[in-house]
Image (spheres, rainbow, N blue to C red):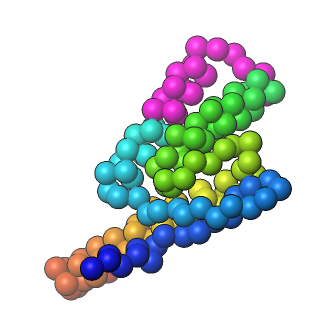
Amino acid sequence: MAGKMNPRIRKVDVGVRELKSIQIYPLSIKDQTNLVEFFTSLMDKFFGEMRDKQFSNAEFFSYIAETITENIPEFMKFVTEETVDIDNLTNHQLSEIIKIVYTDNFEEPGKNIQGLLTNLKGVMFPGMKTA
């Protein structure tokens, strides 16, 4: 019996001249943790280098752009099984993918947990006001 497709799988069209549809998968808890660790290590590296050097505004923005560009392929490995050539990916398409990943894996679950905790507080501490 074939498994049911996850309804959280999203399709995004990527390409500069010709579009190709790719699937963006929801993150497992393990992949979500690994993705957070990946970005944390990038931030640690970035702030470590910022501490050791003086950057002009142009150098600062160039460094950020270079760091993002270098790490797009690694980020894409977390969210799709398909190879996405960054020469064939627009900023709009990348931002759409990032928005899907953030909304489906961080924002919506965060709201659900916050609501659950509010309800739990109301059950466990009925007289306490909730914010």
Question: From the viewer's perspective, is 42 left or right of 30?
Answer: right
Q: Any magenta on residue 12?
A: no
Prevailing secondary structure of the magenta residues? helix
Residue at the (79%, 59%) spot, across then down? 18
Viewer-proximal residue among 94 and 12:
12
Q: Quadrant of residue 122?
A: bottom left
Residue at the (51%, 25%) spot, across then down? 45
Q: Quadrant of residue 1?
A: bottom left
Viewer-proximal residue among 59 and 97:
97
Establish if 64 lies above or below 89: above
Query: How many labels sit on residues?
Result: 0
Residue at the (53%, 45%) spot, across then down? 75
Spot occupied by residue 43 in the image (x, y as percentages of width and height): 52, 34
Residue 129: in sight, yes or no? Answer: yes
As drawn, the residue found furthest toward the front would be 1
Residue at the (16%, 79%) spot, across then down? 124
Viewer-proximal residue among 31 and 112:
31
Residue 115: in sight, yes or no? Answer: no
Establish if 111 lies above or below 36: below
Q: Tell me the quadrant of the picture where the C terminus can be found.
A: bottom left
Question: From the viewer's perspective, is 90 left or right of 26?
Answer: right
Spot occupied by residue 127 in the image (x, y as percentages of width and height): 22, 85
Question: From the viewer's perspective, is 91 left or right of 131?
Answer: right
Establish if 51 lies above or below 63: above
Question: From the viewer's perspective, is 48 left or right of 122?
Answer: right
Start and end of the magenta stretch? Answer: 41-57
Q: Any magenta on residue 51?
A: yes
